[in-house]
Image (cartoon, rainbow, N blue to C red):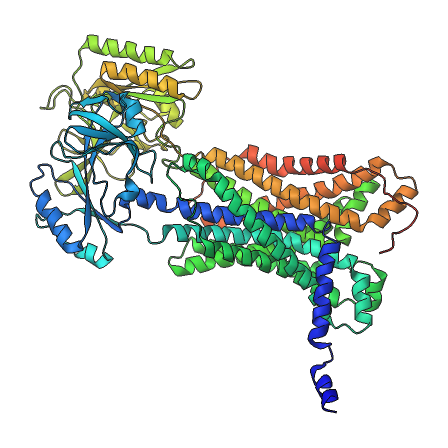
Amino acid sequence: MTLLDQDLSVMSDDGGAAARRVVVRWGMRLFRRQWRSQALILALLTLAIAAAVTGATVIYNIAPAAGNAEFGSASHALRFEDPDGRALPDDIAAAEAWFGTVDVVSRQFQDVAGLFQPVEFRVQSPDGPFSSPMLALVEGRYPATDAEVGITDGVADLLEVDVGDTLQVELGTWTVVGLVENPSDLNEDFALLAEEPGTPESVTVLAGGTDDQLQSFQAPSGASPVAVSRLRNEGALAAIGVLVAATVVLLLVSLVAAAGFVVIAHRRLRQLAMLAAIGATEKHLRLVMVANGVTVGLVAAVVGGVIGLLGWFLMVPHLERAVAHRIDRTAIPWWLIATSMLLVVVAATSAAWWPARAVARTPIVSALSGRPADPLPSRRSSAVAGPALVVGLGCLLLTSTLDGWITAVLGVTGIAALIVGVLAVGPLALRALAGAAARASVATRLATRDLVRFQARSATALGAISLSLGIVVAIVIATSSALYSSGAEGNLAETHLMVRIGEIRDVAPIPERTPDELTDLDSLAGEMAAFLDDATVTPIDIATDPDFEGGSLAGVVLTEEVEPGLNRILTYLYIASPELLEHYDVDLDTVGAEIEVLTVLRGEFFFEPMSPELVTTYQEIDPVYTSLPASFITPGAQSRRGWGGARVAWLIESQTPVDEPQLEEIQQMAAAAGVTVESRDSQADLTALRTGATAAGILLAIGILAMTVGLIRSETEGDLRTLTATGATSRIRRTLTAATAGSLALLGALLGTAVAYLGSVAGFRTELSLTPVPFLHLIAIIIGLPLIAAGTGWLLSGSEPTSVSRQPIE
């Protein structure tokens, strides 16, 4: 009797743990038996987690590089600048006494003919407590005496010296004993000395300690050093950002996976109904699908994690060259990887739960019939879509008018509401498309009606496509705006070279040149241009004041008032010419006669070196490349004021980008003539970013479409057999698939583009410039994607079903 009571006590109405184990095992068998139908879901989740693991590891290692290059392993840096250097020893000793342990790096700069940037000569201890991430030996040895020097590869190439050679410049003469590098910034070029050859131009003191110590430090000389602190946990913070982005991607993948699990649930609808008929509860039916989802998530997490780590190890050598710093392969953020893997399991489980809930609530008789559920009434979707879009746009509008933490809350709320709105508007868009296709061919009508008939998965896929393309369009909008904002295009174009006379500073004394010397330099600029592709040469002159006491070559500058009686020089005032103003889209003939100055500067500024005179009649122009002249005196104003002009530079413009051999040849010519040449620095290519984002978005959308169309067509296999049996040709079958894929792609592109523009205008209307419109990228998304989807569907379909006589028995 006791045993019988025990048996009854462990039993429950739902079968207890034994029933749950049976159901879970059946769910796992479901994954093994139907792995082909879940292959695309598994592939998407695997790729998402692989990308998240690789991306998080890459960013975790890349982010700290900038801090290591500037601070080494220190947390703070103080930069002293003392022209005579007499107070530096006492200030450095005081810093060491205050912080406990310091590392001192002193720098001098030497102008070298032909080079725009001066060469840095650095004194730094290879055994310093903080500077090891800033210094490494590549070949030879470190300098040990005042007659030895170590140089980077860049300096060796520029000055054409190697280990064992003699390096001679105005600052001194040394024997090169080794090649060195900054492992945190391989692009940094310098010469390493053992002893200071003279008074350093700047001294950087690297130190540890707290922020309070840094703020409380007082130099004995009364100097105010520039004190900076590195960002704490740069790698972790950046990698968390990648994790957030990966979470968004997993959300999109989950939407597609949900559509796949709907199909899996529908295929097993009769079996689930039989399970319910013999006593299974709703919990059991949900558990079958949830177990399947957990299994898919675990497999994707393990396989994707392994692929991501293998990708990391394989890409490190290539990554070092791309990011220009050394990378430790073993520096892997395991906690971030574990979090990413957990997220993919949660994503797959969540994707399986919703269709499991719907299937569990299906009446047994309806489930045994195998018919798809009736689509939700459109009014339900509109009841959600309208308010969600209004709330989302309203929150984003408020972010530009408020400050503080409330802005972040409103931004997140607005984006979340827009996502909900896009998902809810999907069924409405599908119904509208079916109505618009009422007069189309039979195959097209069938395709659009199937999208409404199988609304659960087609609307989910449409939402995923819309959101993924919306992100792409938002990137295109942002980069298009940034490309034409101040300084975004960099110092010069890839086709530009700037040849300058004189010292390498923003504003420097104008060297006096005879007419013959200027003629020779004009000829030199022409010879440099001859090395390039059909290049043009534009001379650049500055305005000079012949009445100023400093001499006839006193260049006119623009200044701003720092404090009463003290002005700071901003820039030379260049003489306007049609060729230079063409870069700013300004026609000199249309400038009003009363305008004296054309400038990118904003605010109040003054003419100097004469007695400061406020500039009152000027016209603002939009900035472009930062190294081009950006403030001009009009010829009429120059004539009225009686100012002269002096040649200071030449702009050489090639028809094709300047390559390295051409630049080296021109630099050698400049060195022989005593002038300098500036070329384009390395900068992010925003156009490439736009194109890459567009291509990635289109590929992701095609992947989603492939799975969705395949699922819908597999669900309508019976209808396809009927059509084939009644004489439908391969052309009809191809049209069905092409219309399904093209319709989803078109709706997704239109919805994603519309929401991206609405959200961008609402949230960033004061920061973003919506002109010029990136037509090519938008055309690729709105027109190119539907054409690619329809064409691919047409080519890959059309084969006759294996059986047209009977429905296969499951």
796 or 518: nearer the viewer = 796
Which quadrant would residue 107 be assigned to in this image?
A: top left
For image coordinates 8% across by 50% down, the residue present is 220
Marks counted in the figure total 0
Q: Quadrant of residue 608?
A: top left
Q: Please state the horizontal and vertical placement of residue 384, each as a whole percent of the image.
A: 63, 60
Quarter of the image with the N terminus is bottom right
- Asked if one can make out residue 146 in the rendered structure from this viewpoint, the answer is yes
**Residue 667, position in %: x, y?**
30, 18
View extreme (left): residue? 86
Residue 471, position as x, y percentages in the image? 54, 46
- Residue farthest to the bottom? 1
Which is more toward the observer, 67 or 262?
67
Residue located at (49% from left, 50% from top): 762
Residue shown at 49%/37% (left/top)?
689
Q: Between residue 130 and residue 611, name the one nearer to us.
A: 130
Image quadrant containing the C terminus: bottom right
Q: Does 157 sit left or right of 550 as displayed?
A: right
Q: Quadrant of residue 541?
A: top left
Left-right relation of 684 to 232: right
Q: Would residue 262 be visible to someone looking at this image?
A: no
Q: Nearer the viewer, residue 193 or 450?
A: 193
On the image, the x and y values in percent for residue 128 come to: 22, 45
Up/down of 441 relative to 157, above or below = below
Residue under the image location 31 percent in, 45 percent down:
68
